[in-house]
Image (tube, rainbow, N blue to C red):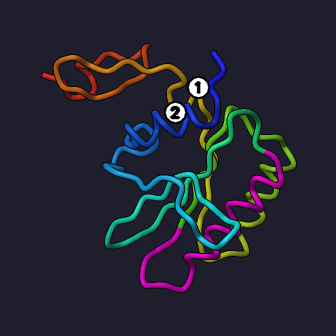
Amino acid sequence: MHRTERQIEDYLSDYPYLISPEFEEVERQVRLEKDQIADLVYKDDQRIVVIELKKDRANKRDVEQIVGYCKYYQGGPRKVSGILVARSIIESARTLLDKENTKNPFHMEFKAIGSDIPRDITVCEECGRARGVEEDCKTLGCN
């Protein structure tokens, strides 16, 4: 099943720990500048993580977009990083992402829907946590 970008945003904002286990809550559609809106942003006392979602393959323009978002937050007291989420990433975009990581003070990474982040989820009736349909809820800490 191919989800729309909005559907991906919906389930990742409801269950942000699917992106990273320590993410408990994220902000949606965060306006950075008048024409820039980040899909999701995680903030805690130590860091800011900008999350950009793409429904298909991530390309070089998508990498440039998340670089711009990370630069927006750069310079404050918190560590800044970015996560680009898509079904896959084209090789030239992966190369650009690696290059940008060597020349910027922030770190960015790519996470693939389907391998790094579950494509299809189910919600445990006992604990209310989402998981990939292929995962056993008991291994995720449900009693």
Whether residue 6 is in magenta: the answer is no
Query: Can you say whether 70 is above or below 58 in the image?
Result: below
Q: Name the amino acid, label 2.
A: Ile
Q: Residues within 10 Å of mark 2 (few under 14, many from 20)?
A: many
What residue do we see at 76% from left, 43% from top?
A: 58
Q: Name the amino acid, label 1.
A: Gly
Q: What is the tally of numbered marks visible in this picture?
A: 2
Tell me if 127 is positioned left or right of 70 in this view. left
Nearer to the camera, 5 or 129: 5
> Residue 43's x, y, as percent?
39, 64
Q: Quadrant of the C terminus?
A: top left
> Residue 77's x, y, as percent?
42, 84
Span colored in magenta: 59-80
Q: Quadrant of residue 112?
A: top right
What residue do we see at 42% from left, 15% from top?
A: 133
Q: Label 1's element?
A: loop
The residue under label 1 is 114
Instruction: Tell me the distance, in whole angstroms, between the alpha carbons under discs 2 and 1.
Output: 6 Å
Whether pointer 2 and pointer 1 mark residues with C-beta atoms closer than 8 Å, the reply is yes
Query: Can you say whether 135 is above or below 96 in the image?
Result: above
Q: Label 2's element?
A: loop
The residue under label 2 is 117
Main SS of residues in magenta: helix
Tell me if 74 is positioned left or right of 86 in this view. left
